[in-house]
Image (cartoon, rainbow, N blue to C red):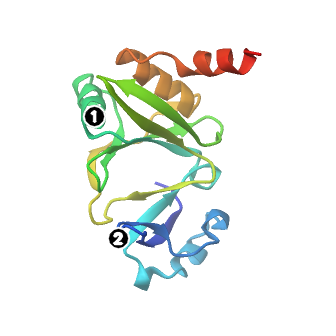
Amino acid sequence: RGWVTIPLTLDHEGRPKKPLDLRWPETPHNAEIINSLSWGAAKGIGVVLGAASGNLAALDVDDVEFGAAVAEAIKHKGLPAYLVRTIRQRLHVYAQEEHPSASTTREVRWRGRSFKVELKARGTQVAAPPTPGYTLLMDNPPPLVPSLAAAWESIARSFGIPDQSKVTAAKANFP
């Protein structure tokens, strides 16, 4: 797929999510260098997001029910997608951005619950299958989107979640 991968180790909660090498953000798109990483000690595989992986980005949905609803809606509409169920049974929705964006977080309120949706892009990585606990749900090439924020707003709108970019802009202009 042309994605840069890195070896992961266990985080402080015992999940295979932490990069083994602290210099991972500088890992170039070079097979020789990637193959020379500490794969023997790896507990999982991370995918580097942003320009190194062709502007790959991922929505990290931190709610089991909402993640399942998003996955079901994508499948029901027959949309091509690359979807991964995470070790906590949540969801990663991958996309290719036209230009790599900065990572941000949205606070979401849906069905009386509050949770976060991380827009993971430049400067971040995500654990991916075959990392233990990560399951591939759909294996289509990630769709090309203008930005991950635009993709998120489209999903949010389809679930009746208000456009947060306008809320953020309004708050920013408030004296």
Can you name the residue that lies furthest to the right here?
Answer: 175
Q: In front here: 157 or 7?
A: 157
Badge 1 crowding class, 10 Å Cα cut-off, few under 14, some 14 to 19, many 20 or more, is: many
**Quadrant location of the C terminus?**
top right
Q: Nearer the viewer, residue 117 or 154?
A: 117
Q: Are marks 1 and 2 in contact (CB under 8 Å)?
A: no
Residues 111 and 133: in front is: 111
In the image, 144: left or right of 136? right
Q: Position of residue 155 (x, y in %)?
A: 41, 24
Which amino acid type is marked by label 2? Gly
- Circle 2 — which element? loop
Q: Secondary structure at mark 1?
A: helix
Front residue of 19 and 35:
19
Residue 137 lies, with reference to residue 28, above or below; the image says above
Please report the residue visible at 57 percent of the width from the left and 45 percent of the height from the top. Answer: 121
- The mark found on residue 134 in the picture is none
Give the x, y percent position of residue 53: 56, 53
Given the image, on which type of amino acid does mark 1 rest?
Ala
Task: State whether residue 68 is above or below residue 164.
Answer: below
Question: Seen from this angle, which residue lies furthest front?
Answer: 175
When asked about the image quadrant of residue 69, the answer is top left
The residue carrying mark 1 is 71
Relative to 86, is 162 on the left or the right? right
Q: CA distance from mark 1 to mark 2?
A: 26 Å
Q: Which residue is mark 2?
A: 14
Q: Position of residue 45 (x, y in %)?
A: 41, 66
Residue 150 quadrant: top right
State which mark lies toward you, 1 or 2: 2
**Coordinates of residue 174 in the picture (x, y in percent):** 72, 15
Seen in the picture, residue 98 relative to 36 is either above or below; the reply is: above
Residue in the image at 58% along x and 31% along y = 147
Q: Residue at the location (55% across, 52% down)?
A: 49
